[in-house]
Amino acid sequence: MRKLLLPVLLLSCAAANAQNSKALTVTDYERAEKFMGYNTAPLIDGANVRPNWFTGDSFWYRNLTPKGSEYIIVDAAKGTRNLAFDHDKFASELSKATQSTFKAEALPASISFTDDGNFATVYAGNKYWNYNLQTGTLSENTNPAQGNRSATMNRRNAMAGGVISPDGKRMAYINDYNLWVRDLATGKQTQLTTDGEKDFGYATDNAGWSHSDAAILKWSPDSRKIATFKQDQRKVGDMYLVTTNVGTPALKAWKYPLPGDKDIAMIHRCIVEVDNPKVIMLKVEADPHRATLSDDISSSGSLDDVNWSADATQLAFVSTSRDHKQEKVRIANAATGAVREVFEEVVPTQYESGWGSINWRYLPQSNEIIWFSERDNWGHLYLYNAANGKLKNQITKGNWVVTRLLKVDEKNRLIYFVANGHDKINPYFSHVFKIGFDGKKLTDLTPETGFHQVTFSPSGNYLVDTYSQPNVAPVTVLRNKNGKVITTVQKTDVSRLSASGWKAPTPITVKAHDGKTDLYGLMFTPTNLDPSKKYPIINYIYPGPQGGSMGGNWGFSAARGDHQALAELGFVVVLIEGTSNPLRSKSFHDMAYGKMSENTLPDQVTGMQQLAQKYPYIDINRAGMWGHSGGGFATACAMFKYPDFFKVGISESGNHDNRNYEDDWGERYIGLLTKDASGKSNYEDQANQNFAKNLKGKLMLAHGMMDDNVPPYNTLLVVEALEKAGKDYDLVIFPNSAHGYGQYSYYMTRRRWDYFVRYLMGAETPKEYQLKPQIDIR
């Protein structure tokens, strides 16, 4: 009897537990997946206006509609907005010519227009075609590049690594560590330099984490000279990655300097004359591979911090010190290489010239320099005399920050720029302003509340402005250069999206850990939220310090990653822009300078606690966190340093020890690596593996083993420390993936959902659910 009774009791207990336990189903996951970007985008109409300007002040764009798409032309001077052509007739003509079937609402997305606006061009039926906008006739196009800027750009992009001259006649490129040019008309190739060698070549691109075969240079306006450098990385240490495959693995090795290394990549600046090849080395010491904007000398898309004079006789440039604390503004004689020191700026923490663009300009016509500085605690513009290096006047001033210098009108002495901090609703909402060189007549050209993104016409007389809020759909308007609205170009329609059950996130405001500073962010909740229930809270984090969890875009986004999808499974998901992130005051950004491992975590904890007090349905005792890259670093740190608060964490591709990450990152935001009398460095207490023994909750680590941004050894250090401490953890490895996991990114998303459902919610998950990404057929 006793032998029979025990199994019966066990079965009864198991049945009772099964009845009481919660399990999410395939249907639950499918409902969540409805809120992924690939499912929300097809339900949005009139979004993403991308103006393509003609030679004059008019532009075209492709507009997505409920049925498909349409092509629109806007004439800025006339203030008109019309269909670019008769779509039914175009479809009919194209169908006849190609013996295929095209519908008016589903014309090829490859349609573009000639610069003069007379023809629409399209590739269909293995041929290029021209559609005459005046006559409505279609003819074969035997020279698709002629008169078409888009085709020219495509040709440029096809020539990997080359840089086209301003006159469009030549392309500069690297061959065997030397600089060459190709005549695009004849194909003739000319070698410009001869002494380039491995690890000491011309225009080579390597910032450790970012490296390619593209040439890093800037052509002079007359297309006769090239500003570039010879990069010396001969003594720089190597980084190694190894592929996973059947047979002998392939070794990938490249130069990857680390904080504290004696030798880092150095650039020897030069000017190369093209017509009669000649190299003129600038008479200045070599500079560290640094830029004012970021940790790559080509982060702006070409050679950073270099301005040619219009006549190509002078080259202004900025030299950045290894720790980003010193900026030297210099002007070189393009013929002799002689260099003149103009002025310098030294800061106690780290200097940056803006966000998204380099905010200084050399104005040789008036012999002035517009300079960006945070010297009064806010990022502002200053006007200098380029002849003697003396400050003439501060241009912008106030408790707000210039983020991007858009356009300088030298003739009228006006500056157009983007700034944050003026909007009363949210200091991260960007507006576009103009102001005189003298600092007078500051004008908000985009006064509507929201996050504004603008594109100027080539003439500078008009701008296309798209503005929105995280919970307010975009509106696109055409303005003149004084900000007057000429016409509404497009209003984004989210009615089909809303009808599907979607809802916008909730903007939130909390106090920072200092109890005084306002922090801003977003909160995502299930669309079927029941306020009487309790929901676990998940914090998505990217701690910066060069950016934040919002990624700098405070405009409308229907999906914003998988935040709403994850919330739909039964969570509250929050993004809190913590202190030490940019786009506000210098003191705000510097709150954790030298202490990067703070990761804004004190702000995240106190912010989540405040939200739980305001929204009783948040279960603060079930708090989780996840992040990627810097967010992976922050998540593991949160699990180790706040083990009683965060119960579950998912750390993806984290730079857990900045001594194992490229030199510039740590040296910029922590400072140069130094050691005390005992030999302990200032980086030691900021390494996650040193605190792994504190883990109490559930931690999943993930990394791509071919990650050439954050090498996988960062995560393996944490793995080893956890094992030494006898701690349980979960590990997801992507054997041949880089930093973002590529084709396996959706696999990681599903594993992330499963992990939070199982360990934060305490529920079962459907087995091996497959996400089903799709393409918007429009």
Image: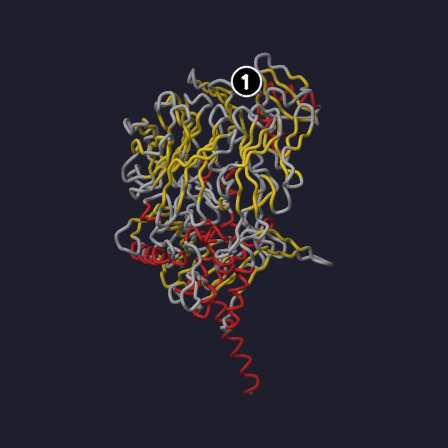
User: Mark 1 — residue?
Assistant: 117
- Seen in the picture, residue 152 relative to 626 is either above or below; the reply is above
**Quadrant of the image for the C terminus?**
top right
Query: Residue 676 placed where, x, y %?
Result: 40, 65
Q: Is residue 46 something that shows in the picture? A: no
Q: Is residue 440 something that shows in the picture? A: yes
- Seen in the picture, residue 247 relative to 577 is either above or below; the reply is below
**Under tag 1, what secondary structure?**
loop
Query: Residue 164 placed where, x, y %?
Result: 59, 29
Q: How is the image coloured?
A: secondary structure
Q: Residues within 10 Å of mark 1 (few under 14, many from 20)?
A: many
- Seen in the picture, residue 712 relative to 561 is either above or below; the reply is below
Closest to the observer: 387 or 763? 387
Query: Residue 240 placed where, x, y %?
Result: 61, 56
- Under mark 1, the amino acid is Gly
Q: Is residue 215 left or right of residue 36?
A: right
Residue furthest out toward the bottom: 1
Closest to the observer: 38 or 235? 235
Q: Is residue 255 left or right of residue 364?
A: right
Q: How many marks?
A: 1
**Quadrant of the image for the N terminus?**
bottom right
Residue furthest out toward the top: 135
Closest to the observer: 42 or 395? 395
Residue furthest out toward the right: 247
Quarter holding residue 686: bottom left
Query: Residue 464 placed where, x, y %?
Result: 43, 27
